[in-house]
Structures are given as structure tokens and as C-alpha cells.
Image (cartoon, rainbow, N blue to C red):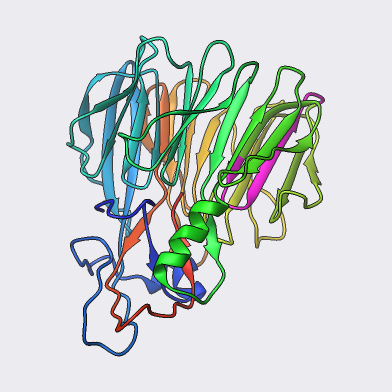
Amino acid sequence: MKRSTSLSAILVASIASALLPGCLDPGQDDGGAPRFEEGTEALSQPSPSSTVRIARVLGPQLEIQERTFDYLPTSYVVQPGGVDQVVMAGDRVVALRPNGSVVAKDGAVGAAWTTVAAPGSAVKVVAAGNTIATLSSTGRVRIKRGALSEPWVVAVGAGAKQVDLAGCGVLPSGGTLATALAACDAASRIGYIDASNRFYARTLASPTWTLMASNVASISMAGTGIGVLTTAGSFLVKDGALTAAWTTVAQGVKRIAVGGFTTDHPYAYVTNAGDLYVRRLQEPAYSLLASGDPTINLFASALAMRQASGALSLMVPNTSGTPRYTPWVSQGTGRDLTLSRYFVTLDVSRTSGPSITTVVLAE
């Protein structure tokens, strides 16, 4: 998709259409970003076009593949230059080079890289919506919002152990597209763990940090979902406001992940025994999906994992409904496998500032 707004993806439709992949026709494509046509009376019928990006790191080599919403496999495209880490958000790709520099690109998979941070600037990168965050070797956190040419802003001066970002998820109904985009930008979140293992978070629009929890080993944020792994090995989650209560999911946990961006986003954890459990928000219980001590990357409809052996596997959604989880599909052997949130483009018609029912934006 073309990034014509400050956010990577827009869907104006009902919540049912947004959350049921079978309702979307991957053959429909408007070929561009949301646009307005004068002389019409109301919102036109949405015509979605969805794309999923999959990135794998084989040694230092980065390869990216695009699939339509039916998840039919396509070829991986080799990206120039070696990488230590890659993250994606919509059509934005951000990579950490071995020398500690950060490069990024918007738009086509074959687009040229733009250097956004100099060598030695970062040891970790994260991305969500239109925001990139870097973590330095001294624990400094910097964020860049909007275009790749925008300046960096220091969010944490020093001492941070981990940083994460979350896009906005599902917005309330009413208002115009412009107000919805502004609301989503304001709802996006950032969180970090300080040197004393305290977890702080805030919206990107607010300067005030909220102490979320103490004795935290790692965090994962997506949409309105937040997960923490405590230093004692407990997995706690919350959904909604930053001040919402924590719910304990499991003990004896070594790794966690939270996916976005729909109201049915998944939570996952890996036990000390190396077993992977996943539950979507609207499911009654967690399901055992893999063993082999995997690392996991999630988003609204698919799961990617790397097992301790280096085996990379992808699990795509079953759009027919049951079974909910399909078999894992091998993606070779490498260092990492990650996914972008799916995104949708459509036509919007108006006379003057349409009233919208629901807006869902990818992270």
C-alpha cells in the first residue's frame, strides 16, 4: 500500500467485516491510498485490498515476501545489505545493521533503503504505526514519528533495558476520517523497562509516564493489549486502558508475545519446558501449538516462530472457521521470521467530511 497518511493502513467498514477475513475479497484493489471523490452523497461501499508481509533473516541476509489475504505463497525478495534485526509495520520495513545503524523504507518491497540512524546508534529497534523507536547500548530510547525524514526525539535519556510500541487498534465510531486518524495517532503507545525492572508506559501524545508494574523482565505491546513477564516467571496481561487490572495467565514462563490489532488479538507464551501456548482474546483457553523452545512473532491473523534448532515456521489463519489453527508451514532455517500487520486500502466518498462507523488501523 502507498503511505499517504501518517499511518500505515486504514479500513472503514463494520467491525464484523474487519474481523472476519472471509468477508474480504483479496481480488479487489483500488490501487492506492484512501481518496475522496466530490459530488457524492455518502460513504461508498468499501473495496478492501489486503497484503501480508513476511520477512526472514537467513544469516545476515534479509528476504521479504508479500502475500494477498488468501496467504498463497509467493517468492522471497532478497534485500541488499546485512541485518541483525528486522521489524515491520504495514508497508514500513526497519532494519538494524550489524554496525548499529538503522535503515528503513516505506512502500514497495524493492524500494531503496534510507539510513535513519548512524552506526553505533542502536542495539534494538521496534516499529508500530508511523513510529520507530531505537534502544542504544546506554539505554537511551529515541522515537521518530511520521515520515522517515522527521527528527528523532529522546523519550528516555538512559538506563532502559527494553522498549516497545503499540499501534492504536480499533477506534470508536463517529467523526471524519481525519479526526479518526488523529485519534489513532494519539492512542498509540510506548513502553520501556528501566534499570530497576520497572515497566512504564504512556501514549505517544502524552508526556506523562504511568508506572505499570515492578519486577518486570520483558514486555510486549500491541493495540490495546499489554503483556509482561515478571522476574519470577509469571505472565500477566491486560487489555484496554493503561490503568486496567492485570490478569495472571501462567507461571513458569520464559518468553511472551502479544499480537494486534483487532479485538481478537492473540497472546502467546513459551514455558520453561519450551512449549508454545496461544490464545486469541475471544477464545476460552490457551492452545498448545508447538514445542522446541520457539521464539514467536504474532499479529492479528498469523503466527511466525523460530525454534531453538533454527527452523522457521509460519501458521496462517483458517478463513473457513474451523479448525482455528492450521498446520505450521516451513520457511527454511534462519535467525528470525517476522510478520507485518495486514493492511487494507479502500475508496471513501464524501461531500464534506463523511461520518464513519468504525476505523481499524494496522500497527
Residue drawn at x 51%, y 77% as measured from the top left: 174
Report x, y in % for residue 211. 77, 36
- Nearer to us in this view, 349 or 125: 349
- Relative to 331, 355 lies left or right: right
- Relative to 243, 8 lies left or right: left
Report x, y in % for residue 199. 72, 31
Is residue 279 positioned above or below 101 on the image?
A: below
- Nearer to us in this view, 132 or 82: 132
Count of numbered tags: 0
* Snapshot quadrant of residue 337: top left
Residue drawn at x 54%, y 48% as measured from the top left: 188
Report x, y in % for residue 261. 52, 54
Reply yes or no: does residue 44 show up in magenta.
no
Task: Look at the image and tell me whether residue 257 can be seen.
Answer: no
Residue drawn at x 33%, y 36% as measured from the top left: 93
Report x, y in % for residue 30. 20, 67
* Snapshot quadrant of residue 253: top right
- Nearer to us in this view, 247 or 269: 247
Task: Look at the image and tell me whether residue 34 can be seen.
Answer: yes
- Relative to 265, 241 lies left or right: right
Residue drawn at x 21%, y 28% as measured from the top left: 78
In the image, farthest residue toward the bottom: 41
Q: Which residues are magenta?
A: 221-232
Reply yes or no: does residue 227 show up in magenta.
yes
- Nearer to us in this view, 46 or 68: 46
- Secondary structure that dominates the magenta span: strand
* Snapshot quadrant of residue 331: top left
Is residue 111 positioned above or below 280 on the image?
A: above
- Relative to 122, 250 lies left or right: right
